[in-house]
Amino acid sequence: MKHERRFSKGVFGAQYRLEVAAEIVSGRVFSLTELWRSMDEPPSLSSLQMELKNYEQVGLLIRQDAVEGMREVYYLASDSFFWQACRELLKELTVTADTSARQTTRTYSDNRDH
């Protein structure tokens, strides 16, 4: 995930922005903790909250009205290609990073044999 976070920081300005967006599905309603639990290597809750706030400010997320008795804030993911594009980009970066790591390991092993 290191390569993907470095890419996200360089392109999107924040190391978690891409992987957070990749977890969000258009039209889905979710809470901060639900999203956090769904991630393989989640950022801190405060970092995740900051990302959700950024998406809300640009209209990609819509904060839902509070439900009586519920402390959790829920968001609706707008119907946007952005979420799918981030999933595809993250998948591509992960494959590239895995391929690179295998090539590096193979090269190191080949050099040790000589």
Image: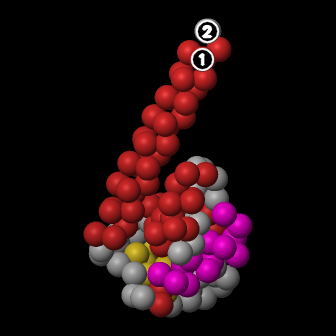
Q: Percent position (x, y) of residue 52?
A: 54, 78
Q: Nearer the viewer, residue 4 or 70?
A: 4
Mark 1 lies on a secondary structure that is helix
Residue pointed to by mark 2: 114
As rendered, which of 75 and 42 lies closer to the eye? Answer: 42
The boundaries of the magenta stretch are 43-55
Q: Residues within 10 Å of mark 2 (few under 14, many from 20)?
A: few
Magenta stretch encompasses residue 44: yes
- The residue sitting at 52% across, 54% down in the picture is 4
| Residue indicated by mark 1 | 111
Identified by mark 1, the residue type is Asn
Give the structural element (helix, strand or loop) at label 2: loop
- Where residue 74 appears, as percent x and y from the top left, is 53, 79
The location of residue 41, given as percent across then percent down, is: 64, 53
Above or below, 68 against 25 in this view is below
Q: Foreground: 20 or 97?
A: 97
Pointer 2 with pointer 1, Cβ within 8 A: yes
Identify the residue shown where x is 64% and y is 59%.
Answer: 42
Magenta segment, principal secondary structure? helix
Q: Quadrant of the C terminus?
A: top right
